[in-house]
Amino acid sequence: MNQPHADLDTFRRALPEALGSALRERFDERFSVAQAVRDHHGRDESPFPAAPPDAVVYVNDTAEVVELVRLCRLHKVPLIPFGVGSSLEGALLAVQGGISVDLSGMNRIVAIHPEDLTATVQAGVTRKQLNDALKDTGIFFPIDPGADATLGGMTATRASGTNAVRYGTMRENVLALEVVTADAKVLRTGTRARKSSAGYDLTRLLVGSEGTLGIVTEVTVRLYPQPEAISAAVVSFGSIEGAVNTAIQTIQVGVPVARCEFLDEATVRAINAYAKTSLREATTLFFEFHGTEASVREQSDTVEQIARDNGGQDFEWATRPEERTRLWNARHNAYFACLQVRPGCRAISTDTCVPISRLADSLIGARAILDRATVPTMILGHVGDGNFHAVILVNPEDPAEMAECERLNDEIVRLALSMDGTCTGEHGIGLHKMGFLCEEAGEDAVELMRRIKNALDPDHIMNPGKIFRA
Amino acid sequence: MNQPHADLDTFRRALPEALGSALRERFDERFSVAQAVRDHHGRDESPFPAAPPDAVVYVNDTAEVVELVRLCRLHKVPLIPFGVGSSLEGALLAVQGGISVDLSGMNRIVAIHPEDLTATVQAGVTRKQLNDALKDTGIFFPIDPGADATLGGMTATRASGTNAVRYGTMRENVLALEVVTADAKVLRTGTRARKSSAGYDLTRLLVGSEGTLGIVTEVTVRLYPQPEAISAAVVSFGSIEGAVNTAIQTIQVGVPVARCEFLDEATVRAINAYAKTSLREATTLFFEFHGTEASVREQSDTVEQIARDNGGQDFEWATRPEERTRLWNARHNAYFACLQVRPGCRAISTDTCVPISRLADSLIGARAILDRATVPTMILGHVGDGNFHAVILVNPEDPAEMAECERLNDEIVRLALSMDGTCTGEHGIGLHKMGFLCEEAGEDAVELMRRIKNALDPDHIMNPGKIFRA
């Protein structure tokens, strides 16, 4: 399992010479076979060995993507869309060779419609770039995975983040897409209307398809009015149980909390070291409340009471915007902070999500599994959704550690599946979780996915070898 | 267009004798070819001529659906799932003959998990039945189309209703499905986790597929805590503009209104006559606010101010539960009230939905189009979503009226499409809007839907002839 794609290398063949010439001619210096460029595009934030593409093409617009797909299709050469390279599951690795399609140059904000609370952006726009563009409009885009990912990448993995508990994930927030299909057609799925019953939901089919059904070139998302009032709070607990039960009860009573994040003691310690914060090193919940002044006060009073009933220490409020920014930056960098605990290591991050009532069993069960680990581990996550990440720090060169890590990961996933949960709340299947997908969804459901793939991409040129085996 | 399926009758052939015998043997008196039973299953709330199935089978459980699909598949005979028959777009008409699969006997509440805010029900459970079962739990299921539809039917059409502005549609609220595929396999899509990135979103692909990709047998939905406080209000306006602009501004400032319904003067008159209410006969908005006592007060103060700025008359509050029930029952029966305005008539209901900033242009434009009608017309709808229905009352026996009605419908839909809207917010495509779907999504997107259909149902036995032509 430490080389989940080793057996797929048999598919790999050299880039056809005719294709190389055609691409060079068409894209000039935006076509590259330089080793450094290929290496950069053949790895991501996953712990898997790099699998560089045969070449990289930097595209500037949808018409270029169409041309590129047309050429690759002729030669049946794979295309792997690439944003900022923040996949955690190996979705970007060129396990069957082919062309990495770097969309970072397609970073134009196409349209912002504050009056409709929608924005349309090219796939290479990152979430921070979009929010910067919205700065003076009084509206914002809530979805915030840890990395400053592109909207295209976030669409591909059905990403979410800390705000999903209130605002939903990419599933709920992508209204429409522009996509280039395997037969080099440009489709628009969906409209800017908030709801529709017009035929099959191609938008939702593409969201989460990890580039295997087409290359997303434009994304239209929902936006939200900036809340009149925001407050954030940090509360620490003497036990994991107290923190988790606070999260569960907050959701069950229906507090419309905007963020509810869990960090175990090891994570807080890593953050303090990395971000120079001075958080109390204990099991901790970060909260954020959005609403009117009165409703934020009501929400926080309710949650403070729940926390107190569960042994929570005093709430520490982060009321000034710069304090809140510091807090949430620390949270967003938690994954990178954890990596620093063991220099040179890589991390495997579990990503299970369970029904909220099973969160305590799932998270405390995971902690018990991790307590047997010989390598450093942390737990953090979006507990308001029932989703958390066990971060396992490994030396990727050490087969015994990698094997141990996969065993821990397996146990944590199986525990979640036994609770009617999912093996991935927000990171995707990529290369790593194909086996778990079969267990979770069943072989018949995976076969149905395979039939859809075959119908839409019969030559398997769209990011082949991901999500399920052909 | 008054017989949208006339040309499809060529597909129709008699029920194979061997299939009839096998079904009679297996299902006994739950297999029927009686004319009255077939007639009942061959019409719906659409204005289209009946197209009865060749037979009706009343199924009791998923295993029976599997057997039925297996038999029909052998003989390549169509299957049309049937709940309560409330389709407005002809989705239930057996335009290619076949078996109507009556799921009303599959009306078991499988599981309620108040601690997770989820419920799993068989497809024949209706929305009112589910809420009755939830009565003492403090939680509820919000999606409420006008009819007391089944959860299976609501899944098939991606239904919504008056609460969608706050709680979303079936798209957002179906977590998981059990479905019998065209090759008679039982699949489970999704889990009870709130979010997942595990492979293609088969759940969302099936939601809105109108029975063309499989027969939904079980539905798992999200539930919500009953709000601590609810208040409802009625406000009337001297102009359509005032009402529509109130709705638009309410959404734009981000009031989390639970319901925001528009009724024009003709609709209010029809409701007063039908439901014996005494509402002021003018352009009217119905509102409902959910939250804590304080937040409901804040929301209603904000909306009252917006309404006043737009020429709204005094708010009339319906604070007692029985007043509210009376109000919303009147709203839910509005479609049937409109039908009574012209005894013996049928209604064509438009269903456009546009980005919120275009609602005024779209609705006032529709009113101008309808002002030229020779038949009675009304407008009502879920304006907080940008969705409204023009109800056009026609004598279905009068070809000139039907033609006029289709012209009006065409114009209203084209207006919405020109505003980046959709031809159907919640009723589905059925038979009626296949042409509009091509205009809205484009031929290439429809071709992609067709490929998915062919991949999942190669013999076209699942409700054939709906959404798009084969």
Image (cartoon, coloured by chain):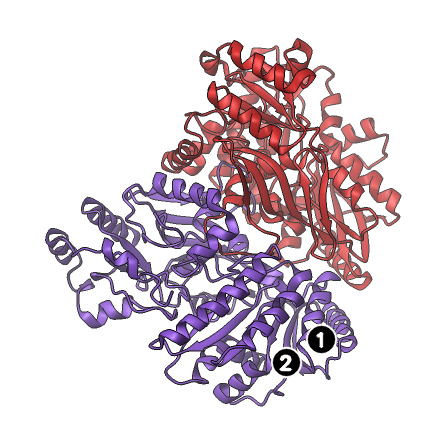
Chain colours: A red, B purple
Is B320 displayed left or right of A313 in the figure? left
**Kind of residue at disc 2:** Thr
Contact between marks 2 and 1 (CB within 8 A): the answer is yes
B308 on left or right of A155: right
Instruction: Say the numbered circle drawn on residue B133.
Output: none
Q: Which residue is mark 1?
A: B242
Q: Position of residue B411 (x, y in %)?
A: 53, 65
Question: Horizontal and vertical percent for residue B119?
Answer: 47, 56
Between B52 and B146, which is closer to the camera in this rendering?
B52
Residue at mark 1: chain: B
Q: Position of residue A109 (x, y in %)?
A: 73, 40
Amino acid type, label 1: Gly
Left or right of B175? Residue B40 is: left
Residue A238: image quadrant is top right
The residue carrying mark 2 is B283
Q: Is residue B70 visible?
A: yes
Image height of A209 relative to A50, above or below: below
Label 1: element kind: helix
Q: Is residue A283 visible in this depiction of the protein?
A: no
What chain letter is assigned to the residue under label 2? Answer: B
Q: Position of residue B204 (x, y in %)?
A: 48, 47
Residue name at image x 37 percent, y 44 percent: B453
Foreground: A308 or A450? Answer: A450
Where disc 2 sits, the SS reads strand
Does residue A95 sit above or below A304 in this rendering?
above
Packing grade of label 1 (10 A; few <14, some 14-19, many >=20) is many
Disc 2 with disc 1 on a shared chain: yes
Up-down relation of residue A96 to residue A114 (above or below): above
CA gap between label 2 and label 1 equals 9 Å
Vertical placement of A100 versus A381: above or below?
above
Question: In this orientation, which residue lies closer to the viewer: B461 or B117?
Answer: B461
